[in-house]
Image (cartoon, rainbow, N blue to C red):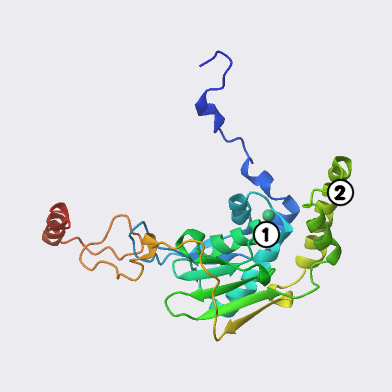
Amino acid sequence: MAPNETPRADIGATPPNRLMWSIAEWLDDAPLPTFEVLDTRSAQGRLDTRVKTVKVADLVLAHGHACDGLLRGVWAMRALADVAFGDTPIDRSDLLVVSKNSPCLGDVAAYLTGGRARFGTHRLDDTLGVGFQLQQLSTGRAWEVREEPGFFPATIIAWEAALLRGELSESDMRELLAVHEAAQWDWVRDVLLPSAPSDHYRARKLDYLKLPAPLHEARRTDTVNRLVPPPIGLPSPDDPTLENEPINQSTLELWQQRYDAGPS
Ligand SMILES: [Zn+2]
């Protein structure tokens, strides 16, 4: 290593508040929707009964930035989850989601539902606009949510497209990107945040959902055993959700021998 090179160990050092710059204080202080989610316990595990709470700040860290699209997606998904699941947590091991192929809405869809393009459980349909469709894999039940037409200002929509076309001069782009970002946040602050998710995001149950074709299909192995019941005779030290009955040593040894012998 050269004398002035930073040692690798220092590159990842975390100064105080390093994570929190990613979400503006006024946004983090706002009353934002949260999501309760369930997942499986491990790579071959059963469903974990412990609920996790996902906040907007978690989504921002996963997505890379806070933006109006992320927040519109959060409002839409909250309205959808309220209709589809009520107070029941979102089971991320049992859902297929359809979203527009937008960086922001697609990340909200994948993060909050567990749907993944590589397993065929995140499908894409650009006609959905700002909205999602959900299908519960175990039951086939389906729902959708759509943003009320006209809720998001037409001027901002027009600029979103114009700023991606590459037709503006560099000097215009430098200033207009800043004006555009401010317009998006003004709308979030003044219009979206004071509204309830169901005010402008309409969710309903679907009798039938015609799914777009998958980009890829593969077996998602970490959800295969989701419904296997917990052990009866072998409380696991790694599973605090189980009642810890006194361990029966002979039962433990029997199952350990069975495991040590290998599966075949
Ligand atoms: Zn975004």
Could you say which quadrant of the image residue 148 lies in?
bottom right
For label 2, count other residues whose C-alpha is less than 10 Å away and answer few (under 14), some (14-19) or many (20+): some
Q: Position of residue 176 (x, y in %)?
A: 86, 48
Q: Which residue is mark 2?
A: 176
Q: Residue at x 58, y 83 (%)?
A: 205
Q: Which residue is mark 1?
A: 70
Q: Is mark 1 within 8 Å of ligand 1?
A: yes
For label 1, count other residues whose C-alpha is less than 10 Å away and answer few (under 14), some (14-19) or many (20+): many
Q: Is residue 73 left or right of residue 180?
A: left
Q: Is residue 86 visible?
A: no
Q: Secondary structure at mark 2?
A: helix
Q: Secondary structure at mark 1?
A: helix
In front: 89, or 150? 150
The alpha-carbon separation of the residues under discs 1 and 2 comes to 21 Å
Q: Amino acid at mark 2?
A: Leu
Q: Nearer the viewer, mark 1 or mark 2?
A: 2
Q: Is residue 124 visible?
A: yes
Q: Residue at x 87, y 44 (%)?
A: 175
Could you say which quadrant of the image residue 58 lies in?
bottom right
Q: Position of residue 43 (x, y in %)?
A: 36, 56
In front: 248, or 37? 37
